[in-house]
Amino acid sequence: MPHFRSITRDGLVEIVVHRIRELGGRLVIAVDGADAAEPVALADDIASALRATGRPAEVVSLHDYIRPASLRMEFGRDDELSYRTAWFDYAAVRREVVDTLRERGRWLPALWNESTDRSARATVRDAPANLVVALAGPMLLGRAPKFDLTIRLDMSESALRRHTPPDARWTIPALLCHNIENPDTPTLFVRWDHPDRPALRDAGPS
């Protein structure tokens, strides 16, 4: 049986920073979690803590790599399969963030503006030799990109229903189905039903 221990949010950030400090070079880490888990907020905390140690760090929200509305809503606004397969451009994340950071020392912070449904018009950035990019969003594990460290913010169905706005609850079956079909083992698996009192299982290397 896996062992879980209570931990604070700050304690989780400290553990992640410690793990990252053991790794050299440019890194891409993943904070995987439903929107209800607010993975971008945790990624921001991690990036801030890294900068405080002198390590450059940036955050990329998966929602800045969302596909155009004409593609993601081709089969309706609440199609479960589309949410899993067509809403987010995971291939572009791999191409414009993960691969290009490692191969060319460059990365693109955003591809598409979800609010305006237009190109984000972001500029490709040069990366310092020890930059950490934290990619945050839903259904990241089980995708093609290979991350240097992964954090899974796991929420039960009941917690997802509590924390997800009514107009977005149609995404819950898709989220649960993805987790079942892609049982990747993250570096850090965190029970996140109560974000103010998470529980951590150290699952070893990703």
Image (tube, rainbow, N blue to C red):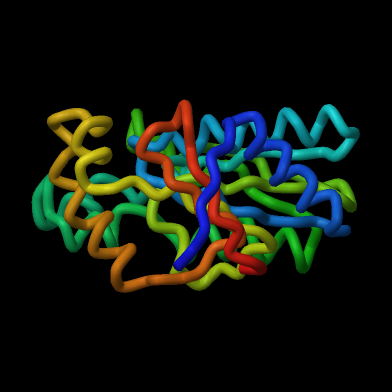
Q: In this view, does 31 lie above or below 36?
A: below
Q: Does the rendering let one see residue 53? A: yes
What residue sits 61% from the left and 42% below the top?
109
Q: Quadrant of residue 177?
A: bottom left
If the image is split into quadrants, where does the C terminus sit?
Answer: bottom right
- Is 53 on the left-hand or right-hand side of 159? right
Find residue 182 and report its horizontal and vertical position in percent: 37, 71
72 lies left or right of 48: left
The residue located at (64%, 61%) in the rendering is: 98
Quarter of the N terminus within the rendering: bottom left
Of residue 77 and residue 172, the one placed in the foreground of this image is 172
Q: How many marks?
A: 0
Question: Which of the 4 quarters of the picture holds residue 159?
Answer: top left
Identify the residue at image location x=50%, y=72%. 144
Q: Which residue is at a point 63% across and 56% down the rendered structure image? A: 97
Q: Say whether residue 199 is left or right of residue 129.
A: left
Q: Can I make out residue 65 in this image?
A: no
Give the vertical position of 180 relative to 140 (above or below). Answer: below
Location of residue 3 with respect to 172 vertically, above or below = below
Residue 15 place in picture, x, y as percent: 71, 44
Residue 184 at what x, y percent from top left?
47, 70
> Residue 166, how many percent across, how many down?
13, 30
Q: Say which of 84 and 173 sits in front.
A: 173
